[in-house]
Image (tube, coloured by chain):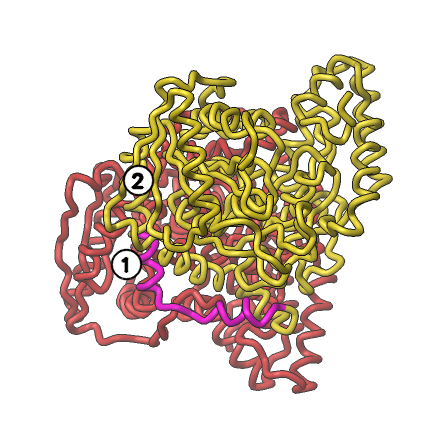
Chain colours: A red, B yellow
Amino acid sequence: MKPLHTLTATEAAARIAAGELQSERLVRACLDRIASREPEIRAWAHLDVDGVLRAAREADKQRQSKARPLGALHGIPIAVKDIIATAGLRTECNSEVFRDTLTHMDAAVVTLLRAAGAIIMGKTETVELAAWGGRVAPTANPHDLARTPGGSSSGSAAVVADFMVPLALGTQTGGSIIRPASFCGVVGFKPTFGTLSTEGVKHYAPTLDTVGWYARSVADVALLARVLEVSDQQIPKSLPLRGLCIGAWRTPYWAASSPETRDALAEAKRRLCDAGAIVAEVEFGEDFLALDELTRIVMRGQGRISFLHLDRTAPDKISATIRKGMERMSSDQLCAALDRAAALRPAFDTVARRFDAVMVPSAPGEAPIGLASTGSWIFNGLWTLLHVPCVNLPGLTGPHGLPVGIQLVAPRYADAHLLTVAQTVSDVLQSSGLQ
Amino acid sequence: MKPLHTLTATEAAARIAAGELQSERLVRACLDRIASREPEIRAWAHLDVDGVLRAAREADKQRQSKARPLGALHGIPIAVKDIIATAGLRTECNSEVFRDTLTHMDAAVVTLLRAAGAIIMGKTETVELAAWGGRVAPTANPHDLARTPGGSSSGSAAVVADFMVPLALGTQTGGSIIRPASFCGVVGFKPTFGTLSTEGVKHYAPTLDTVGWYARSVADVALLARVLEVSDQQIPKSLPLRGLCIGAWRTPYWAASSPETRDALAEAKRRLCDAGAIVAEVEFGEDFLALDELTRIVMRGQGRISFLHLDRTAPDKISATIRKGMERMSSDQLCAALDRAAALRPAFDTVARRFDAVMVPSAPGEAPIGLASTGSWIFNGLWTLLHVPCVNLPGLTGPHGLPVGIQLVAPRYADAHLLTVAQTVSDVLQSSGLQ
């Protein structure tokens, strides 16, 4: 029998609903795992042990009373990135500005999670203000403690990868969901921009800021997508592989990819083709070459606006690199970048709609050595700017035996179909021996 | 000598800085005005008399100590719409969901105001959740208590119009800044979308939600624009009228304008031409006909997402009309509207850039009778969707002697030039006898 802390949310929710498992037992198993691993992983910013046990016991009582139908996440522990507000728990954003700051109201997404019965397990470490150039999280990669878990949702990816909780919320403004998912070997999902409220989530670049999450299975990612009502369409569980048509795009940044990433994509392609899917190499026009540069302009231009009030009141409490990035750019430059991005969104969708999904690198390669840098987000920013849904799928590994993710993207609002395709592709990636 | 509560912020700030006026005296004068008028106007949701007097005395002490250079709003009272978070003051959004909700952190804009020395006077009444169909504010129009002040920033427009404070923050998602400004006869300003952080401001439609403000002079509006760093350009105080080129556009909704609005625009045109300006009738292409419809789609589609967590947890505490507006629309419809709006923004800017400003109606006419409806926002939603800066200028009146505003709009990020033009045009509107 699987140890309780290794259950997926889908498995645990089914057992809780059937009366075969108490939330308190599940939560205790997760807390035990945390107690043994946290000294090395350092993924938690705040953990209220008494509070979560109380919440778990309350969930168990509710289940027994049968007063109300159970939510889809009844009694399931979930971690929350420490830039997302939680009532009665600190939200410090790994920033001296918010040291010891207690938040009193849940962010909108946290309210939805609690309404579905979830137990908010605690807050996970983040890069300072989840911003470019911010102080990194102390978190180590569970697969190799000498390596970064990626950022900025460092703690959220690590706690899921390390079996401390089955689910964790993160956010992506550049590459903050998908890159850590790739480095930590978990499923990561960034839904279509704007399908979820960001109320209660620290602002950075509001045209890019997107809430997403981590799990150890696509089914769990889809479960959360249903709870949060990301899509107006049903998410079917699977799809036949035969006839599935995947576009493979090297993106304009192929030169940044390491051999392990190229090998992983080639391996994924081989397995998909062997299983009867069609994988077509696809090219996008020259307009798309500018995507990364445009993302950086929007991030810098809007970041300055989002952090202006902090800079006016507590400049000495913000990392120098973040402050340096706050130099005012001309509004013409920002406006032109916003307009070009807006025009590229439907252009990408039109091409991408010909495929069930577009397969691209998740990251340049395995997680780099050292915690001082969270790695490159060159394969992520463009998708954040295009507002499209992205999934990282684990299963393949690089020369050091570390995870190398595959990213699937789809047109805006095709979240439901993308998750179905991801389930199908994931089965193929997990099915046979790793590289 | 002018009674203190009638001073503009610019006048009061100069006198405070010169040591001729104490903030406490100014604040007391405003409190006296409020005490005498509030029973009829009902514009304040929360007013912490002791707190503001304490803050004013603190400001006076700071000025005397000369320890730090004074901020541009040192000791100036400013009102804040009750959907904008303020530390230690309730933020109830005129919603049963947030009854007695104390907020513990200032919204980003409020932080910037306090950093500039402003005294947060209190919170002003709003339409429920600042949303379409929400419960209206109890606030009366200071010019005629039987009439609406407009909404959703009802209280903010009324407190400035009624000389209770010189400045007030509001927000606009549809027409919530400009319409109340027109009905109450004050200067209202909605800056270019995205030039200010909305962190700590209740979400409704994040593609539209914009913080703006009210004052009794364009100079005061410009003062706040400088403090909040809306523009990367200087805001000169005035411009010669001769050679100024104003485009006059009837908009696609001219049929909704009453004779008083048409007369006011004609009168403005006549005065501008007499003073040497050029006023050119301008037409925009057929693409622009859909603007109002697109605004309503974005508002409804995004409103559902912003309020989903409230609907899941407290459906009985949300007005039925708001809930009815939350019916899920197809994501294709929302996506198409977002893309069409994004394409129209640069298209509008290109035409508008030929003029110093484009002159359009602010509202269909004088404030309607009754408080049950806040009037029509048919002349406002399009500008919110286009993300352009808008100013309402008072000075002209309708058949009942009530204010009829003139709206000036400009391309995105032309906020500084628009405010300079507004100053120039305002002088002409205020210069001679009202109609």
Mark 1 or mark 2, which is nearer to you?
Answer: 2
* Label 2: chain letter: B
Residue occupying the point 22% across, 47% down: A262
Residue occupying the point 43% across, 49% down: B379
Which quadrant of the structure image shows residue A20? bottom right
Magenta part of the chain: B318-339
Which quadrant of the structure image shows residue B280? top left
Q: CA distance from mark 1 to mark 2?
A: 31 Å
Left or right, residue B118 beside residue A304: right
Is B130 included in the stretch rendered in magenta? no
Q: Amino acid at mark 1?
A: Ala
Crowd around label 2: few <14 · some 14–19 · many ≥20 (10 Å):
some
User: Which of B72/A26 is in front?
Assistant: B72
Crowd around label 1: few <14 · some 14–19 · many ≥20 (10 Å):
many
Left or right, residue A16 beside residue B102: left
- List x then y, in percent, for residue A107: 59, 56
- List x then y, in percent, for residue B23: 79, 25
Name the mark on residue A309.
none
Same-subunit check for callouts 1 and 2: no
Name the mark on residue B348.
2
A227 up-or-down from B341: above or below:
below
